[in-house]
């Protein structure tokens, strides 16, 4: 397991800070790690497949009053690691299930991960993410089909390009906002909401706003 934590101190900051565990799931090669690389470093490079899982911390200002600290687990997509996935999604408040828009097979397999989460972690908020939108002319999963599938699965939907950065920060901002909205009325399972502090300036590992 590898770990990255980036931090910088800012004066002032949102009055309310919440910390959530978030996991990325999906088949090998769909771009989970490059999405995180774009989020954390604003860079892109072809990466070797993740072995086991990698851990990152990221801060997103939802608005002027609220910040979300994400503990992000980027999981391996290879078949031999699937049995370990539950170790990482257990207690997650949110999950990004990523597929490659150029591959209908990875979209179908994303449905496996959604079913897995719905069966074993039903409180987890889901976002289906279609990656590689920079290759629009080569896509094999239409926007309409993906949006309809996400709706049927009870998931949010976003499209991203880890290569260009398009949509990456938006996806994390929108799921952060959804977590804040849902947590105002629902009790997320223990471990999903990790703490809630008032009137404290958050440490900034990296920020989306």
Image (cartoon, grey):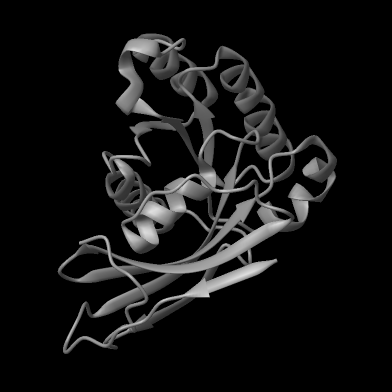
Q: Is residue 142 left or right of residue 100?
A: left
Q: Residue at x 58, y 66 (%)?
A: 55
Q: Is residue 142 visible?
A: yes
- Percent position of residue 17, x then y: 34, 75
> In the rendered image, which quarter contains the C terminus?
bottom left
Q: Is residue 69 left or right of residue 106?
A: left
Q: Is residue 23 left or right of residue 159?
A: right
Q: Residue at x 62, y 24 (%)?
A: 111
Up-down relation of residue 159 to residue 38 (above or below): above
Q: Residue at x 84, y 44 (%)?
A: 83
> In the rendered image, which quarter contains the N terminus?
bottom right
Q: Is residue 24 left or right of residue 183?
A: right
User: Which quadrant of the structure image shows residue 39?
Assistant: bottom left
User: Which quadrant of the structure image shows residue 118?
Assistant: top right
Up-down relation of residue 98 to residue 50 (above or below): above
Q: Residue at x 74, y 38 (%)?
A: 78
Q: Is residue 95 visible?
A: no
- Percent position of residue 73, x then y: 59, 58
Choose between 169 and 47: the one closer to the eye. Answer: 47
- Percent position of residue 142, x then y: 39, 10
- Percent position of residue 179, x then y: 40, 54
Up-down relation of residue 89 to residue 26 (above or below): below
């Amino acid at each position: 397991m590898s770990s990255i934590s980036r931090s910088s101190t800012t004066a002032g900051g949102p009055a309310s800070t919440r910390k959530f565990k978030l996991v990325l799931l999906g088949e090998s090669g769909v771009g989970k790690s490059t999405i995180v690389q774009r989020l954390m470093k604003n860079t892109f490079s072809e990466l070797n497949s993740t072995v086991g899982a990698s851990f990152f911390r990221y801060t997103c200002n939802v608005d002027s009053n609220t910040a979300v600290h994400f503990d992000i687990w980027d999981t391996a997509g290879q078949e031999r690691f699937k049995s370990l996935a539950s170790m990482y999604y257990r207690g997650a408040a949110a999950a990004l299930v990523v597929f490659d828009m150029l591959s209908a097979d990875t979209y179908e397999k994303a449905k496996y991960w959604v079913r897995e989460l719905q069966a074993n972690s039903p409180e987890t908020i889901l976002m289906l993410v279609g990656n590689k939108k920079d290759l629009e002319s080569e896509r094999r999963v239409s926007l309409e089909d993906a949006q309809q599938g996400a709706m049927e699965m009870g998931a949010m939907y976003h499209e991203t390009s880890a290569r260009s950065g398009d949509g990456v920060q938006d996806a994390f901002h929108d799921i952060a906002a959804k977590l804040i909205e849902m947590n105002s009325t629902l009790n997320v399972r223990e471990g999903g909401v990790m703490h809630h502090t008032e009137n404290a300036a958050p440490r900034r590992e990296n920020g989306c706003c």
